[in-house]
Amino acid sequence: MRWTQWWKPSGPVENRPGKNWPAENRSVEYPMIITAMGSWKPEPGTLLEWHPRSEALDAARAAPVHPAPTSFLQEDHLRAAAAASERGDVHHAYTGVATTIDGSLDRDALSRAISAYVLRHEGLRCWFEIDDGAVIRRLGSSAVASFEPSEVGTFATDQEFQRYVRARFSAEATAFEWPGFVVGAVERSADFTLYYAADHAFTDGGSQALVISELADLYALEIGEDAPVPAAAGSHLDYAVDERVRATRYGPDSPEIQAWKQMFADNGGKMPRFPLDLGLAEGERGPVRIVERHLLDAAATGALDAACKSAGARISSGVFAAVAITDYELARRDNYFGITVLSTRHLGDYGVSQGWFVNFAPVAFEVAGAGSFATVAARAHSGFEQSKQIAEAPVHAVLGALAADGTLGSELAVSPNMLSYIDFRWFPGVGRPADTRGEHFTGEGRTSNASMWINRDADHLYLVAQVPDNDVAAESVERYHAHLQRVLESVAREGDYALPTTAGIGSS
């Protein structure tokens, strides 16, 4: 099962940032935003690429095999990427970030900053092979961390730039040769756009939110400006070793695995699906487009937070409650059942590390009979707290047990509809220019879902969703997101939301 597909928003944009946002918010410069790659539109300038020096490439090619295993998600991803390559598919399994930095670009200083960045993160010195079915890791020495810039031309239009970066990311941000990441810039006289993209084997959403501020700080230090020295970062190789050890502690009778099993039994043995018609046949996948929506401004988000606390919950649980109410009112789902992604950075010194530090867990709670948002939020809080406990077990240990006892059967091949909540206010670099101007995007893909990433920053609450690119899905998702927004606005404005009687359900 390709669990690596679950939480990557990818694809061309359906709504440009701000298209569905209130008019008074469209001119606001928000902090780092998760958006579609097509929305990234730097001002024209000289295109620069950073590549390893020849001696660094020689060192990488000579890198010995390292005994550290891949993490479970890395292994899934690498096998899927290898299969896609054999089919001749274009490589889209990358994720990137960009920002604008004031002042003329010091190319040598950025070269040194990139080298320092790679030396800080052991996992970025790795590349992988699949030999006779086995995934093999190679780890380069510090000698690989030597980079130099080259000019590659200019561009005149957004379309020309998009063609250029998409081609570069697809060709170079891959895990089967080193480096598995790309760095580049668009140089202008008074400022420059800095960008970074990496194969998903080396990064997750949290890592991408960290990388641009770290590179900007390392660059600032190299040119003698005042900037924080990045904190020490634990190794993703150590994390992968520990994850494999932790997985052995969980067997069929473990409470965490039993909880997964019970939730699926309570929900017909099915993976979570989006509740409305997406215009696809069962099992069909289609090209995706990104839908972006402003939900609440800062004041209203604070009011929502206060309402959640009054109900004995947190805003993260309140988000799940609002989604559950939307499912209930539009599709008469009496019980919420979803899959969420949770950080595992707390399991070691991984707070600012580059790598894939996440796990997946189910969230389930009852909606019917609640009567109000406050009651649903309290139930969601209990469900979300249970999810955190369940997430102590690596999801692949769970999958092995559920596959062995036949709990899911063919559902093991189904990618579930996902819901994620992230509060970006607590990331390093928040409030500084590089973060404020940051944009985070991914490659394109295919989907059978309409998964949502609901995020909070200092200025607003917003969502990003990956949606099948067809008219039926567009109408369903717009109706769903509009209803969800009304629920959240009502809670922010009134402090609560009354659930309608059964007779009124589905009529919105």
Image (cartoon, grey):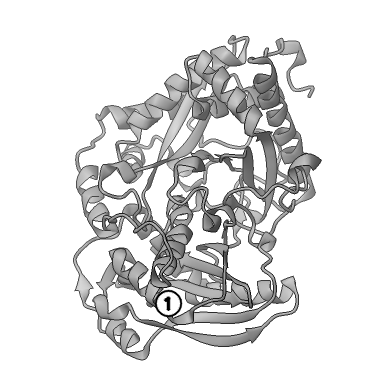
At 30% across and 84% down in the image, what residue appears? Answer: 61
The residue nearer to you, when weighing 293 against 253, is 293
Q: Position of residue 305 (x, y in %)?
A: 55, 24
Q: Is residue 150 above or below residue 201?
A: below
The image shows a total of numbered marks equal to 1
Split into 4 quadrants, where in the image is the C terminus?
top right
**At numbered mark 1, what does the secondary structure look like: helix, strand or loop?**
helix
Q: Position of residue 468 (x, y in %)?
A: 68, 50
Q: Position of residue 467 (x, y in %)?
A: 67, 48
Q: Quadrant of residue 499?
A: top right
Name the residue beneath numbered marker 1: 109
Q: Quadrant of residue 439?
A: bottom right
At 53% across and 52% down in the image, what residue appears? Answer: 8
At 66% across and 26% down in the image, what residue appears? Answer: 488
The residue nearer to you, when weighing 411 against 235, is 235
The residue nearer to you, when weighing 329 against 120, is 120
Residue 506 seen anywhere in this rendered image of the structure: yes
Q: Is residue 151 above or below residue 110?
A: below
Instruction: Please state if 457 lies on the left or on the right of 407 as rendered.
Output: right
Instruction: Please state if 24 lies on the left or on the right of 55 as rendered.
Output: right
Q: Residue furthest bottom?
A: 54
Q: Is residue 331 above or below residue 15?
A: above
Instruction: Please state if 419 lies on the left or on the right of 176 as rendered.
Output: right
